[in-house]
Image: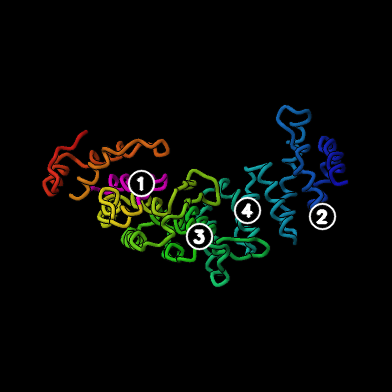
């Protein structure tokens, strides 16, 4: 019945009385009347494609309803409020009243209202992104005791309910970062997740990635990552990803998949760059395991898999971005002979050659002088 009623209502958008009736529903109606009006406006038949008959008239009518939609955004029902302001944003982005109302709603104590409005406001009014970020951090801080672990194994995530919304801690913190917040409080929260062995490996990788890319915390982050690499935790071998942010924009980190948490850490160290020089011996040691395998590894005769190759590739890339030491020279020269593997691009030998050429020639000569391997580097 509702579908038929909505279908029947579309012609009235070309009629002044029909538009006025919708405006009356939105401004003077109760919650049920507003829900119906929003259902009409949200129907694809009401918002046809550009070449459909009546499109121009429908668009003119909808723009006239923007003030009424703003009025409906004060309804007592949170769903009506958020849908009304969302519709107003679709029909007009140049109304100051729409932006003003969105900013008011971002400050709401109701998470679903604040977050849903933030998604559109993030693009409509970039000058308010900091407010959005601070609001999401406040939701995290105010509800920190309520977050609990959900899931099993390496997929455990900190989550809680904010109203009827199922919310993950990492999503709130990511939104805060994307909003431009760089406070000590936010950095501490990300470090807490990174160092929490109960957190999902994806969340830990994501926290480390945000800290490396958006915070000046390398003096604190690098020792954390080194400790993880030397901990022999089984989590290092788990597939993970650094997930994208809550709001789609050029600022987002994006989603990158890794065949192991270890490979993700190597990549993050590379993003830190020269400030991660304390990690160079750890990277050399990892790569050296494939040159001089331990007796246990030799006895097991373990076959290298795709995860090993990706970790080797990320470790070599990290060395090229951080900088080499004398021990890196013979290690990288060994990998110049590495066979091509289709699943790893560019291939290991190419990465090793690029890493050896990443240092200035005079620095390379100095390192070669400190190395026990004096043979020339094949280009």
**Secondary-structure class at tag 2:** helix
Q: Residues within 10 Å of mark 1 (few under 14, many from 20)?
A: many
State the CA–CA distance, disc 4 to disc 3: 33 Å
What mark, if any, has residue 154 been given in the picture?
3
**Secondary-structure class at tag 3:** helix
- Find disc 4 in the rendering and name its residue: 117
Which one is earlier in the sequence, the residue at label 2 or at label 4? 2
Which one is earlier in the sequence, the residue at label 1 or at label 2? 2
- The picture quadrant where one finds residue 146 is bottom right
What mark, if any, has residue 314 been given in the picture?
1
92, above or below 211, in the image: above
State the CA–CA distance, disc 1 to disc 4: 39 Å
Which label lies toward us, 1 or 2? 1
Total numbered labels: 4
Q: Write the start and end of the magenta stretch as one range.
A: 301-325
| In-front residue for pair 256/83 | 256
State the CA–CA distance, disc 1 to disc 2: 61 Å
Q: Residues within 10 Å of mark 4 (few under 14, many from 20)?
A: many
**Secondary-structure class at tag 1:** helix
């Amino acid at each position: 019945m509702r579908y038929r009623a909505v279908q029947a209502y579309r012609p009235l958008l070309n009629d002044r009385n029909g538009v006025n009736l919708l405006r009356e529903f939105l401004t003077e109606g109760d919650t049920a009347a507003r829900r119906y009006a929003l259902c009409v406006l949200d129907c694809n038949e009401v918002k046809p494609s550009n070449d459909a008959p009546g499109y121009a008239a429908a668009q003119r009518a909808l723009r006239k309803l923007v003030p009424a939609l703003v009025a409906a955004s004060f309804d007592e029902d949170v769903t009506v409020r958020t849908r009304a302001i969302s519709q107003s944003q679709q029909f007009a982005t140049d109304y100051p009243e729409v932006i003003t109302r969105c900013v008011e709603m971002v400050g709401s104590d109701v998470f679903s209202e604040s977050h849903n409005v933030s998604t559109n406001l993030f693009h409509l009014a970039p000058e308010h992104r900091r407010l959005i970020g601070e609001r999401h951090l406040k939701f995290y801080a105010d509800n920190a005791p309520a977050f609990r672990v959900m899931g099993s194994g390496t997929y455990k995530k900190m989550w809680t309910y904010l109203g009827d919304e199922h919310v993950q801690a990492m999503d709130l913190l990511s939104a805060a970062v994307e909003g431009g917040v760089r406070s000590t409080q936010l950095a501490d929260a990300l470090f807490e997740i990174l160092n929490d062995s109960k957190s999902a490996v994806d969340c830990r990788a994501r926290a480390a990635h945000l800290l490396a890319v958006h915070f000046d915390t390398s003096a604190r982050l690098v020792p954390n990552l080194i400790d993880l690499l030397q901990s022999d935790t089984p989590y290092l071998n788990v597939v993970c990803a650094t997930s994208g942010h809550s709001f789609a924009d050029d600022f987002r980190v994006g989603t990158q998949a890794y065949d192991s948490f270890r490979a993700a850490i190597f990549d993050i160290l590379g993003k830190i760059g020269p400030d991660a020089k304390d990690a160079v011996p750890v990277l050399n040691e990892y790569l050296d395991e494939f040159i001089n395998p331990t007796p246990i590894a030799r006895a097991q005769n373990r076959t290298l898999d795709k995860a090993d190759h990706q970790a080797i590739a990320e470790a070599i890339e990290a060395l090229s971005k951080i900088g080499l030491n004398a021990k890196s020279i013979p290690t990288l020269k060994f990998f110049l002979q590495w066979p091509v593997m289709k699943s790893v691009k560019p291939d290991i030998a190419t990465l090793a050659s690029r890493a050896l050429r990443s240092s200035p020639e005079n620095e390379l000569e100095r390192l070669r002088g400190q190395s026990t391997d004096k043979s020339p580097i094949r280009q």
